[in-house]
Image (cartoon, grey):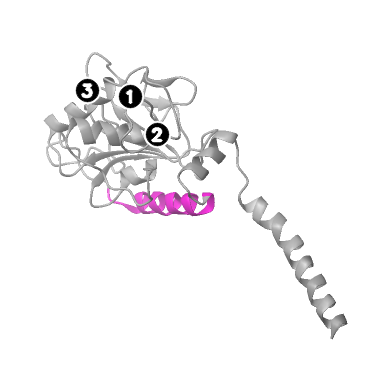
Amino acid sequence: MKKIKNLFLILLSACLVNTWPVYAEEQEYVSEEEREFYEYFNLNKNDVEEYSQNLFEEAQKAPIVPDKMDNGFTRSVSGTWSWRDGVICVSDSYTSFLNHGHAGIVAAAPHYYSTIEANPNVGVQAVRGDWPSRFKPRVYQAGVISTSVAQDQKAAKKAASFLTKPYSLLSTLTTTDTFYCSQLVYQAYRLGAGVSLPHGLPGIITPSDLLHAGATEVTYRYE
């Protein structure tokens, strides 16, 4: 009986030893900041990346609809890049911090032909130039269904009011002193237009959430 018990303990120890490296590999982080992000919000990296991927796949299949200023028609099958104030911009490209994509919002005057973005190391800034020339593999633009053109402009102006604020992945959905990319867009619409965009994970909003069917419509898609 004692030999059987010892054999069981040996086998159990072997299972635990062999299982641990697999788990560590699955939870590999690209930076210490990424590790802090997942621990702070108590999220599983694989679950978040799968969630984002599923939303991006849905956006890839979504119909292209006319922008609010396009008088009811689209100018091409993929839509046309818009510089209208407040249009949401999303890319599914990977970043050095998180593999969730990137997001920004088309800026209002005087930041012509620019997007307001929160980027690592530099914080919130107005970045000039359209996204197809900057990001791969895919770029989207989306309009919020429930807002007017005037509300979208207010969101764009609110985003600009956060210029020079620092970047932080640990920003919450109510934080206004630090930002990450999609949380900046969320706050711009929440505080500027009075609209809280939906998100499917506790405590955070991903770039893919900004393409959430039912809340926004894809007006442009480039790949």
Say whether disc 2 or disc 1 marks the residue closer to the N-terminus.
1
Give the x, y percent position of residue 64: 27, 46
Amino acid residing under circle 1: Thr
Element carrying mark 2: loop
Give the x, y percent position of residue 148: 12, 36
Badge 3: residue crowd in 10 Å (few <14, some 14–19, many ≥20) = many
The alpha-carbon separation of the residues under discs 2 and 3 comes to 20 Å
* Disc 3 target residue: 157
Task: Examine the image and state in which quarter residue 31 appears.
Answer: top right
Residue in front for this viewpoint, 183 or 20 = 20
- Residue 14 lies left or right of residue 147; in this view the side is right
In the rendered structure, which segment of residues is drawn in magenta? Answer: 45-63
* Disc 1 target residue: 115
Give the x, y percent position of residue 97: 53, 34
Residue in the picture at 45% in, 39% down:
101
Residue in the picture at 22% in, 23% down:
157
